[in-house]
Amino acid sequence: AKHARVYGDRDLLARQSKEGMMKLGGGNQSWALWPKSDEDRMKRLDGRFAIACSSHWNFGAPKYAGQTSAHVGLPSILKNNDTATKTFAVFVQRIVGGTTIGWEYCGEYAQLEDDIAGITAAASVSRECKTFILSDIRHSLSRPGGKWHGILDSYRDDIIDLCVFKPKDRATLSAKDLGLNDFPKRKLTQVEFAEKLVNWDYFYRSDQIVFKHYDETIYDFVKDGKTTKNKNNKKRKADEPCAKASDWYAILDQQVQSCNRQAKKKRKRT
């Protein structure tokens, strides 16, 4: 890699390995990597919290282990007074060409106190990411107990509050432009509301986190659950080494260089 970074020798991980990340708890799709029961959580790693950040949802997640600060969406429990000051392990999905090469353990982070939420402009979120997000939401809405029924209702309430109490706020004006002010009588279905919501900048609010340290005990706990991909993002053979963090860093550097070249060409045209 152009920039080897400090933890480039670490193996990337498989999200659904029972020898690796699934040992942390929380199921193989959840972003919260701990058992639901506090008793069960305390039985492993002294009750440590951990989160799995999907690249489709967390655009500001750490790009490499040990990155000083980043922006991610945090589960509410990590923002409660009792746990907000504690550190938590952060794992981030690494995507190349639309497929996952592996997950990287990035270290122990904590939420930055008195943080002003970061906001990613919806226009900068790729169509691929928005499609993925909407697919997730639709799947949740297809089930009576799906969590997005409540989440979308919460967004609707937030927008009503904005319209009533902050009518000239930027967030309010952009919500109205998108037709998200669907009250007092609802006209939009939940899916229709979601399709507009993914184009609202304030949908992409996130929390700033800061790097505290790299915990070798966490990496040792999950390292046997290696990614099934090799350094070329192909399914590896039985005797072939898995992709390492340094392989991801090399790909990341290429992506950044490519973006820079495209931006330079765009500036020349204008």
Image (spheres, helix red, strand yellow):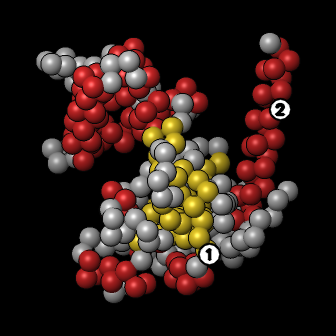
Residue denoted by label 2: 261
The residue positioned 65% from the left and 54% from the top of the image is 63
Q: Position of residue 228 (x, y in %)?
A: 59, 66
Residue 22 visible in the snapshot: no
Mark 1 residue element:
loop
Q: Position of residue 270 (x, y in %)?
A: 80, 12
Residue sitting nearer the eye, 137 or 47: 47
Q: Position of residue 88 (x, y in %)?
A: 47, 69
> Residue 195 sits in which quadrant?
top left
Mark 2 or 1: in front is 1
Residue 161 visible in the snapshot: yes
Is 120 located above or below residue 41 in the figure?
A: above
> Residue 46 sits in which quadrant?
bottom left
Q: Position of residue 212 (x, y in %)?
A: 59, 70
Left or right of 91 on screen, residue 229: right
- Disc 2 marks a residue whose amino acid type is Arg
Q: Which mark is residue 214?
A: 1
